[in-house]
Amino acid sequence: MPPDRQPNKRLTLNNIKQQPQEHLCKGKVVSEDYVEGNFLGLPEQGENVDIVVLQLPYELTTSYGQGTAQGPAACVIASGQVELFDEALGQDLPAGAKIYTAPEWDGEGKNLGEQLDNIRGYLQPWYSGDCFPLALGGEHGILPPLVLAAQHHPLVDGDLKRLTVVQIDAHADLREELNGEAYSHACAAGRSLDLGIGRLLQVGIRAYSKQESELIHSDERITTFFARDTQSPTHGEEAWNQWLETLQTLSGPIHLTLDIDGLDGSLVPATGTPVPGGLSFWQVIETIEAVFAAPKATVISADVNEIVAQEDTPLTQFTAAMLATKIIAAHLKARKEGFWSPHGQVLGKNRKPKETDFFRQQMN
Ligand SMILES: [Mn+2]
């Protein structure tokens, strides 16, 4: 990184805790072109943007604090150290695109249902089809509101059966409930299926229950590549190539959800539940590149979640920042090669948006 892009005043995690949230959103210029509080320090404002980075400091109110609420801000800070040059794109970011970092979701909501509805409300304006939304989380419980917001994308057009979710994760997240909570992070993929998504592809999975295993093998919407196979010393390469080939067969709109615990725990030790035996950094890069390059599919949105700020080194949040940057570069490459074009606001006949108090109704 050229020295002139280094922020001359770095925020520490203690600073994050002490400072009012708006400090992290307003983007204070600390050197000529580096904007503090913006992803990659880029200066873009929120008009006619090509990519929006959304921050969801969400942590389920009833669970023990694991630090995911501070993850998005820590990831944005760590992004200041990510190189702007992407090898596959062959250009420096932003590569002529407008990449805007939106102010964080305000965290408001008196109860879980209201919080999830508010997250959906925060996301939804960015699904008109003109720009690419990338959300940073927060617990994986953000997935159902992301899916509900995605139904407003013109390619989904109110019919979630059209949507495929590609999930990188250590956990299947297919539980009926965890500690009595059906909207726990451990249920995020299951609730997305309940919302009506057409297909779920999972990779990195290595921690799951018997009930989840049975669902994986009985629900034909679910395709799971287990870490036991893709990371196997004897047949891992074969399983890995099958995963990449499967991605190439996808069609229609896709949401990519990247739980960073899908990576091997050594790469993301601060995430809520680091698990050994996970994907390598390059396997996640290959997955991102492959899903964006699938010839009949369009990745309409993505999230990187379960980011927790590591205090001794920035490894966890830096890994998340590098992968979020890779998603941005892969999206721009897809645009460049004609796999993505703005779709504009189209109100089609299938578009019947669900109620804005959907989650509150579910929990009554
Ligand atoms: Mn997860």
Image (spheres, grey):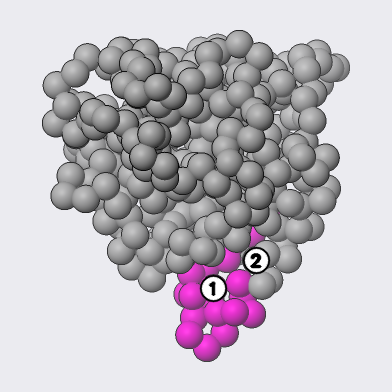
Horizontal side, residue 350 vs residue 133: left or right: right
Q: In this orientation, does residue 162 appear?
A: no
Quadrant of the drawing holding the C terminus: top left
Q: Which mark is residue 230?
A: 1
Q: Residue 323: image x %, image y %? A: 48, 48
Q: Nearer the viewer, residue 16 or 176?
A: 16
Q: Give how far apart the Cα atoms at labels 1 and 2 are.
A: 8 Å
Residue sitting nearer the eye, 333 or 174: 333
Circle 1/circle 2 CB separation < 8 Å: yes
Q: Residue at x 39, y 51 (%)?
A: 319
Closer to the chain start, of discs 1 and 2, is 1
Q: Is residue 292 visible?
A: yes
Residue placed under numbered mark 2 in the picture = 243
Asked whether mark 2 and ligand 1 are closer than 8 Å, the reply comes as no
The type of residue carrying mark 2 is Trp
Q: Residue at x 51, y 63 (%)?
A: 282
Helix, strand or loop for disc 1 = helix
The region drawn magenta spans 220-240
Q: Position of residue 73 (x, y in %)?
A: 33, 30
Is 230 colored magenta in this rendering? yes
Location of residue 330 in the rendering, given as x and y in whole percent from the top left corner? 64, 45
Image height check: is 261 above or below 108?
A: below
Q: Is residue 309 left or right of residue 300?
A: left
Q: Residues within 10 Å of mark 1 (few under 14, many from 20)?
A: many
The label shown at residue 219 is none
| Three-letter residue code for mark 1 | Thr
Q: Is residue 347 above or below residue 174?
A: above
Residue 18 lies in quadrant: top left
Q: Could you tell me which residue is drawn at 73 percent across and 66 percent down? A: 245
